[in-house]
Amino acid sequence: MKKIIFILLLSTQFFFAQSSFEKGNALYQKGQYEQAISAYNSVLASKKHSAELYFNLGNCYYKLNKVAPAIYNYEKALVLNPNDTEIANNLKFAQKLQIDEIKVIPTVGFSKMVHDFASIFHYNTWAWISIGFSILFLLFFIGYYFSQIALYKRIFFFGMFALIGLLLISVSVAISEKNDFENEKPAIVFAEMAFVKSEPQNASNTIFTLHEGTKVYVKETLENWKKIQLTDGTEGWIEKTAIKEVK
Amino acid sequence: MKKFIIAILFIMCNSLLAQIQFEAKASKTSLGLNERLRIDFVMNIDGDNFNQPSFEGFRVIAGPSQQVSQSWVNGKSSFEKIYSYYLLPIQKGNLVIKQASIEYNGQIYKTSPIKINVTNAVEEPKDPNDTQISADDNIYLVADISKTNPYINEPITVVYKLYFSYNIGITNWRELDKPKYNDFWSQNIDIKQLVGEEGMFKGEKYRFVVLRKTVLYPQKSGKLIIEPLSLDIDVQLPTNHRDMFGRVVVTNGNKRVSAGAKTIAVKSLPEAGKPIDFSGAVGKFDFKVIPSKTNLKSGESLDLIVSVTGSGNMKLFNLPRPVVPNSLEMYDPVHSEKVNTTLAGMSGKISDSYTIIPQFKGNYPIKPMQFSYFDLGSGTYKTISSPEIMINVLDGPSANDPVATATPGTSKNIISGSEQFKYIKLKSKLVSINKEDFIGSNIFYSLLFFPFLVLPLIVIFKKKKDAIDGDVFGNRIKMNNRLAKKYLSEAKKQINNKEPFYVALEKAMHNFLKAKLHIETSDMSKTNIQQLLLSRNAGSQTVIDFIELTENCELARFAQSSSASIQQDFDKAVMIISDLEKQIT
């Protein structure tokens, strides 16, 4: 009996979240973006999220011309679903509203190829792929061990070694992707205007000024200050409250 | 009665006698050696043969001058004839002006002599009769300051007034020291024509002119000093001398006047409630941000005018700068000022005009702008916000058009013409935020290493299988053992049905023997079994029990027996089997 109640509770929570999402969509359609935002936020409050939810939130903020929250939510959606073209497209629209214009230094050469290859899948997907390889390896071994025909035996034998290689590659890619994910801390500037200092002190001189919506990468944290790097490679210290980390 | 008549007569006589008067009048009876004396001989008749006295000890510097006047009042005529002399004493001491005489109707009339005391020469300025006017007491320069404790950037005015009394004249003035207004922003208000006015000063009527008006905006708090203004003034002073036409002779003089240094205590603006974006504007203002148009094509330009109107320190603060998205290109502003400065301070309009050229199609907000100022009326800070302005770029070159990408490096922002802002996603699979990563979890590791752990097991299993497949004898024992167990358990199930119970029990026992003694069914005979069991070190009692039980099974199948005995037989079979198991080697 208790179990049934528990399941019922869980399912109502799930339906509640789902219905809030749909309620948000309906409000968005009517153009009531503020109310749509609160509906979507109630989904977030129930500890549920999805790329689509963040995407819709970003759309609401874009419609209200709130640059920083719009970009923030699009970036969050891209974290969950990095290969969605619609999210990337609307993010570009939002970025056109931002005030700062910062060049993106593209990575080139071998490292870019490796990185592109690694970012085809999410690291969890890579983990599943390596498990697949591992099981395939087992099957190949069984095939090798039990097959009676010499040709099959040979094929399975070499297949085993190939699979071991693939397994190692996929595991290392998964681990490095995860490390990248954890080390890369993108953040969005929320303050309308934020001064980036050369040292984590108010008295130190301002190197440049950032406006809301600009994407930065957090490198270090010291008390109320965060060391940030821009997409063009420049670095500086910014007050903690001025930015909001995406992850 | 007699007395009365005498008195009347006497009065009449007296009046008759008093009819002719002839007197000498001196302007003063005591004078300094360097002073002059006027003496008049006055008569009320027209006497002849005036004989002047000798004026011993005096020198006649003017006269005699004769003056005659006649007047009728109420039908009565009066007559006066005066001979006047101006005398200058030539010696000190008591001098006597002797008698003068006239003749009238044959009679001679004389004046009485006058004693004059001549003293030492007196200093001329101390002479009370000297009316020489000094410039010192008659000309003043005054600086009027409207407020001596203003706030920073609150306008104050300094008006320099030159007061001068009615009896002096001014012909020219020059500024010697122009006042310096250190730590003030100052503006002179031009005075086209000096206008003389009347006003009270030091309780007396004075004339004054306003020489100079200056509006000052203090730029620093604390005690500030306005340096004095000094003037060199050409003045005309009247003297006692008169020219031949009786006009006062004036002398030209020169006078330096200076308005003293003034101290002004400037209050700093209050820190409480000071807005962050406060740029020093003090006064009363209105703030407006007006775009020339909000709907336009890409490549067209629009002007955004940021203006402040009102009164205050208009020229002394900066206008806020608009913040626009990066796809609007904004150029440096054109600044214009229309400010009038009056005694009340500066007023008018200052504006910055920004030219903005949009680059891409779309809607772009220009952020609300804030302008803060210190309101002198209420003594508080006030902030005016402009509304957010939406710029709609209706159409124009598509964003990939190379013309539109004016700046390189915006390639990330290029949106192809077919790409539109995408609508929200309608379906979603919500997942828990706190979902743990699969990688690094225990499941991941166990799944990853499971196949490798299985490998040796497979090898061992294969080896074992091969071995088992090779051992035919052992397999048979195993099978019989299994059958024995199987039938025994079946017997237990059938414990209520007599016939199948005993069949199963018998089969179980047979299979047990087959497994233990490695014999076939054909070799099953009681004696054979007995021999074999005994040869394998089984207890003789147990062997007997076993034989008895097998026989019993055959009998009991057809005989009448209670359920209690069935249970007893089953227990017995279990006991015998377990005993044999232990005993057989």
Image (tube, helix red, strand yellow):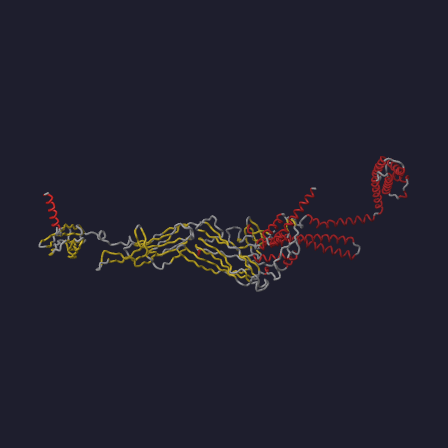
Left of B290 or right of it: where is A113? right
| Viewer-closest of B177 and B278 | B278
| Viewer-closest of B323 and B569 | B323
Q: Quadrant of the N terminus of chain B?
A: top left
Left of B271 or right of it: where is B537? right
Residue B250 visible? The answer is yes
Left of A210 or right of it: where is B523? right
Q: Quadrant of the C terminus of chain B?
A: top right
Give the x, y percent position of residue B564.
Answer: 85, 35
Give the x, y percent position of residue B235.
Answer: 29, 57
Give the x, y percent position of residue A55.
Answer: 62, 54
| Viewer-closest of B403 and A238 | B403
The picture quadrant where one finds residue A158 is bottom right
Q: Residue furthest front?
A: B1
Left of A99 or right of it: where is B488? right
Residue B547 visible? The answer is no
Give the number of callouts.
0
| Viewer-closest of A242 and B52 | B52
Residue B275's place in the image compared with B574, above or below, is below
Give the x, y percent position of residue A150.
Answer: 79, 56
Taking the spot 47% from the left edge, 58% from the top edge, the residue there is: B351
